[in-house]
């Protein structure tokens, strides 16, 4: 249990939120890769646990991850851990004194918190656990309001709320370094947003998508099904320039019926630009325009650092494209080019994903990422159903369960080669989703 190492190889402990569990590992890996750092953990690593031990990182690496993650709650420099109080004590006593010394000085202030996962302690028990750490050489003064250093004893009582053990399965003690960005979920809630629609993406999931995409300052990010721009808002929060397209004229221009209760029509300043202005990132707004995703308007060059999108599923947002089922008739030679209003036709989900992957293969820079949601019917799902492209490598495939038989999967792909031919393999099973099920993953 001892942690014999210098500053360069100290262990760190991540305390993660216990929601969106399937999304946590890809997010942390993506944020570490932004600093070209590996995800190196202990041999007993359990992805479903709320506590992860990380090796081979610096404190700056940890602070960088915590400055963006919405899945991580807090990070600590790990001083000791064990499955029993005796093991924890031995581990702490074996931790190098020179690593502790800077934070235990006589002229410093500190406090110790106790956190328990899946169990609530009464105040008396918490005090007893803190008093049991009196063997540590703290020389400073306790300050509960504004301490210079914060330490934490964390106890893991498992994840079964119906069988909570008397003693924890594992205990950790360490120095607090930084908190994650869970506050963004509240401050960017779509309930507080200037411009929303029926299918505006939840703020937490929007930031998770931006992190999976490794969006960073000065990137150019594109959403081909932009809707009310929730994903652009999240990406701009991390300093990226954002743009998008959508086939729905009314949504792009912010006109028509409002989505809010007790509001009949949208106001004159309800639009995507106003959303970015609300959060202070209007300067990163490139533009949005009305466009059909099946007929790209972009030159076939690699322009985008990331494509982050939520394609329509055909439940609350129709899957439409421009075109006609009628036979194409060649215009007469004397045709003078009068204005033409295009009609729309069905845009099948398999075609949507084929077009999306082909578009990403041509318009992403090498190393750029495509992030999108794939709705599936759980009883018939298998990994072979995920659309593939020879230029795109599958990075992660995370499930958000909606019901016993429906879910959607967040697919992350990275461009690893330039395209040679137009090709994509798509295997698709239409998903019989109900309106109530689709509501679970949309507007919060």
Image (cartoon, rainbow, N blue to C red):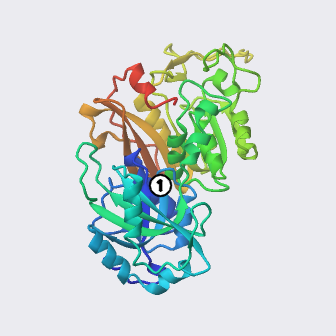
Return the x and y of residue 359 as percentages of the image width and height. 52, 42
At 49% from the left edge and 24% from the top edge, which residue is drawn? 319
Residue nearest the viewer, comparing 53 with 330:
53
At 50% from the left edge and 55% from the top edge, which residue is drawn? 418
At 49% from the left edge and 58% from the top edge, which residue is drawn? 74
Residue nearest the viewer, comparing 395 with 83:
83
Residue 151 visible within the image: yes
Mark 1, secondary structure of its residue? strand
Residue hosting label 1? 72
Task: Locate the N terminus by quadrant.
Answer: bottom left
Return the x and y of residue 375 as percentages of the image width and height. 39, 33
As displayed, is residue 87 above or below residue 194?
below
Residue nearest the viewer, comparing 299 with 427:
427
Return the x and y of residue 388 as percentages of the image width and height. 38, 45
As displayed, is residue 138 above or below residue 366?
below
As displayed, is residue 337 above or below residue 407?
above
In which quadrant of the rendered view does residue 190 lie?
top right
Return the x and y of residue 125 as percentages of the image width and height. 36, 58
In which quadrant of the rendered view does residue 162 lie?
top left
Residue sitting at the far front? 124
Tell me: 341 left or right of 352. Answer: right
At 49% from the left edge and 33% from the top edge, which residue is drawn? 311
Tell me: 250 left or right of 162. Answer: right
As displayed, is residue 8 above or below residue 133?
below
Residue 226 visible within the image: no
Tell me: 43 left or right of 322. Answer: left
Q: Residues within 10 Å of mark 1 (few under 14, many from 20)?
A: many
Q: How many marks?
A: 1
Tell me: 385 left or right of 312. Answer: left
């Amino acid at each position: 249990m001892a942690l014999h190492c210098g500053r360069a190889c100290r262990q760190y402990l991540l305390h993660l939120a216990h929601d969106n569990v399937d999304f946590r590992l890809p997010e942390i890996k993506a944020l570490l890769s932004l600093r070209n750092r590996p995800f190196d953990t202990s041999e007993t690593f359990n992805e479903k646990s709320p506590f992860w031990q990380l090796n081979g990182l610096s404190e700056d690496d940890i602070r960088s991850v915590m400055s963006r993650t919405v899945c991580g709650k807090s990070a600590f420099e790990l001083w000791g851990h064990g499955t029993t109080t005796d093991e924890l004590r031995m581990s702490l006593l074996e931790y190098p004194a020179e690593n502790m010394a800077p934070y235990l000085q006589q002229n410093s202030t500190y406090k110790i918190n106790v956190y328990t996962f899946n169990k609530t302690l009464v105040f008396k028990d918490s005090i007893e656990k803190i008093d049991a750490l009196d063997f540590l050489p703290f020389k400073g003064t306790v300050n509960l309001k504004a301490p210079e250093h914060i330490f934490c004893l964390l106890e893991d009582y498992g994840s079964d709320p119906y069988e909570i053990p008397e003693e924890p399965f594992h205990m950790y003690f360490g120095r607090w370094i930084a908190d994650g960005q869970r506050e963004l979920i509240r401050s960017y809630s779509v309930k507080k947003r200037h411009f929303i629609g029926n299918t505006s993406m939840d703020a937490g999931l929007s930031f998770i998508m931006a992190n999976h995409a490794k969006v960073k300052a000065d990137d150019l990010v594109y959403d081909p099904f932009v809707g009310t721009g929730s994903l652009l808002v999240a990406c701009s929060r991390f300093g990226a320039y954002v743009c998008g397209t959508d086939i729905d004229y009314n949504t792009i221009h912010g006109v028509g019926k409002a989505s809010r209760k007790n509001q009949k029509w949208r106001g004159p300043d309800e639009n995507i630009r106003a959303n970015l202005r609300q959060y202070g990132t209007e300067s990163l707004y490139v533009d949005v325009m009305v466009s059909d995703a099946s007929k790209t308007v972009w030159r076939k060059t690699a322009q985008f650092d990331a494509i982050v999108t939520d394609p329509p599923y055909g439940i609350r947002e129709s899957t439409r494209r421009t075109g006609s089922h009628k036979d194409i008739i060649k215009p007469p030679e004397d045709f003078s080019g009068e204005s033409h209003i295009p009609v729309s036709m069905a845009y099948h989900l398999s075609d949507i994903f084929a077009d999306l992957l082909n578009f990403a293969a041509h318009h992403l820079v090498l190393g750029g990422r495509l992030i999108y949601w794939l709705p599936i019917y759980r009883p018939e799902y298998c990994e072979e159903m995920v659309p593939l492209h020879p230029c795109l490598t599958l990075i992660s495939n995370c499930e958000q369960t909606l019901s016993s038989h429906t879910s959607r999967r967040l697919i992350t792909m990275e461009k690893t080669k330039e395209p040679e031919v137009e090709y994509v393999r798509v295997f698709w099973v239409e998903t019989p989703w109900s309106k109530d099920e689709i509501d679970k993953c949309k507007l919060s």
